[in-house]
Image (cartoon, rainbow, N blue to C red):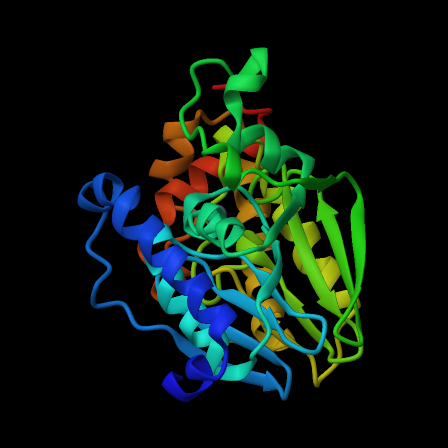
Amino acid sequence: MRILLAGAVGRLAGLAAVAAVVSGVGRGALSAQQDMSDVEITTIPIESDLFMLMGRGGNIGLSVGEDGAFLIDDQFAPLTEKILAAVAEVTDQPVRWVLNTHWHGDHTGGNENLVNAGGLIVAHRMVYRLLNPAEFADLVGRSGQAPRAALPVVTFDEGVQFHWNGRHIDVTHIGRAHTDGDAIVHFPRANVFHMGDTFFHGRYPFVDMDSGGGVDGVIAAANFVLERSNEGTRIIPGHGDLASPEHLRQYRDMLETVRMRVASLVANGRTEDQVVAAAPTADLDETWGANSERFVRAVYQSLSGGME
Ligand SMILES: [Zn+2]
């Protein structure tokens, strides 16, 4: 890394600027957050120019090439310096694009730092809204206001295509899934997807009902990717290890099973608490984790229109 940096004076200046931002502005927020000084960024090669980065928070996708680095999600602000160092290990080009798969802070926390380092933020229209509630009357009082520099400067509704680093990159919005602003990223030639938090590998999903999520959208997202997958497909989940279509299929089947069970309890007139008490995931918890109540409540609310 040092050798790469020494040869790239411009990059070094960019990193120094980021370091200044992190140490200056970030200090207050840092003390309020978890200490991230011990977090290491692990780079998992997928193709020679395509990587998954794991640190803390949502998994990062990285495409590199002569046009510049294209990043999918950026974890937390205190990690930006380490993320840029990991990027510099595999390319001498700066980060030019940052695609946010959704608005959550463990996927967008590095936005401001990366803009200051020369990146442009792209995301679904709802990401702009939820990161910038002050601008929208219906979101008044909602927390999560991001600094102006952290906001997307390009937004899309249905999807957007990038033609970058010799690749076509297809970005598709899946309505009301993990949130109401999720994007799924597809690198067709590499046969690679980044699913954001529509896919928690090996765990029950978090469906953010307060941000317009819904279980049917999470199932739709899994089906969208499975329909475009074959045996060689590799899938970057929002959280968890790099996955295969078989992992995603098991996840989709689990989602459908829980949905079906909760739907039949709802059809029998059970309240939300009664559905939870009926333990519709009892035989699944060993595989998918003990944190099922939050998911069951989200499924119930999805099926009953969000009202008790
Ligand atoms: Zn999320």
Residue at 44%, 42% in the rendered image:
296
Residue 18 occupies quadrant: bottom left
| 159 versus 254 height, above or below | above
Residue at 46%, 85% in the rendered image:
4
Residue 244 occupies quadrant: bottom right
Does the rendering let one see residue 241? no
Residue at 57%, 68% in the rendered image:
94
Q: Viewer-proximal residue, 290 or 229?
A: 229
Q: Is residue 234 left or right of residue 34?
A: right
| 129 versus 169 height, above or below | above
State the image coordinates of residue 50 (x, y, percent, origin top left). 62, 79
Q: Viewer-proximal residue, 136 or 18?
A: 18
The quadrant of the image that shows the N terminus is bottom left
State the image coordinates of residue 39 (x, y, percent, origin top left). 27, 67
Q: Viewer-proximal residue, 29 or 188?
A: 29
State the image coordinates of residue 168 (x, y, percent, origin top left). 81, 69
State the image coordinates of residue 207 (x, y, percent, origin top left). 50, 42
Q: Which residue lies furthest to the front in this view?
A: 9
Q: Which residue lies furthest to the top in this view?
A: 137
Residue at 49%, 50% in the rendered image:
116
Does the rendering let one see residue 82? yes
Q: Is residue 177 left or right of residue 163?
A: left
